[in-house]
Image (cartoon, helix red, strand yellow):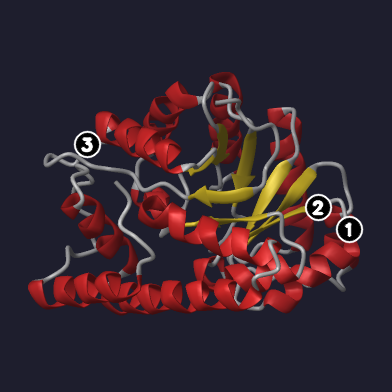
Amino acid sequence: MRKVERLEGVIPALITPFTESGRVNGNALIDLMKWNLGQGAVSFFIGGSSAECFLMTPSERIEAMEIAAQMKDDAYLIAHVGAISTDIAIDYAKHAVDLGYDAIAATPPFYYGFGPKEIYQYYYDLAQAAGKPVLVYNFPGNTGKNFDLENPIYRKMFTSDFILGVKHTNQIVYQLERFKALNPNLIMMNGFDETSIAAYALGCEGSIGSTFNFMYYHYEAIREAFYAGKVEEARELQHRANNIMNALVNVGLFPAIKYILNEWGFDAGSPRRPFFPLDDASKTVVDTALAQNLLRKPE
């Protein structure tokens, strides 16, 4: 299989499997990547929210990055390097580049109320240190940072050559279109699984999602149906995917994804505290949603 050279398509935002003792389970991570490649995936997003990145130590984040880099010849790899500290984010970015990652992504710095000038400089410094433009991980629901595209600093940032594009993890899909209107050269990646079809309609190059860990095939079917002009089919598949997402969110998204992967034979381990593993009632909710809505259980 020829490795793709561009950021596009349906991209699993990989989890981080943990051993019983709480260490990064490298063998399980590679197994999950190989299995998804077998399903048709060609790219992976490493170290993001689905990976529980902000619950991991810096050394663990680098370790997971190093493990996933074993697949660099087979897949397009994006490393999430976001941190509150510019220096820490730069350290992650340099590691990713040295390991051969194809792209880097970063959440904006949060918690301290950084303003547009500081956020602009953060992304500029990251790109300069990495020697490549950065994919902005736009997740205002978690970071508390909204990009006001009427602000001249943000307009300058998103029309610069140090920004590759945006991972738009925001239910406001209108803003996705506004990014494209501001700069058609931005690579726009949808970040909420449940808005995939809407994002394609507004010009996204692809989607990066957490549930793609186990249902890549289902979301690739949505994408293929949409671009083949089979809009009703794509809408029905999105509806079924959203039924699954609704069930997972109601019981705990990341614990639910790990439960599914464990049930399917992957040693995903438990979610990191303060997350709880699913109780029996929650497992039943997940099992029922999958049985009623998943396009097919991959082999």
- Between residues 179 and 162, which one lies in front from this camera angle? 179
Numbered badge on residue 186 = 2
- The image shows residue 39, relative to residue 229, as above or below, that is above
Mark 3, secondary structure of its residue: loop
Question: Which image quarter is the N terminus in?
Answer: top right
Picture quadrant where residue 188 is located: bottom right
Residue at mark 3: 23
Query: Left or right of 273: which side holds 2?
Result: right
How far is the residue under mark 1 from the one under mark 3? 42 Å
Of the numbered discs 3 and 2, the one sitting upstream in the chain is 3
How far is the residue under mark 3 from the one under mark 2? 37 Å
Mark 2, secondary structure of its residue: loop
Which of the two discs, 1 and 3, sits closer to the camera? 1
Label 2 with label 1: CB-CB less than 8 Å:
yes
Give the residue drawn at x 90%, y 56%. Answer: 156
- Between residues 11 and 52, which one lies in front from this camera angle? 11
Give the residue drawn at x 41%, y 60%. Answer: 211
Of the numbered discs 1 and 3, the one sitting upstream in the chain is 3
How far is the residue under mark 2 from the one under mark 1? 6 Å
* Label 3 packing within 10 angstroms: few (<14), some (14-19), many (20+): few
The answer to whether any part of residue 228 appears in the image is yes
Residue at mark 1: 183
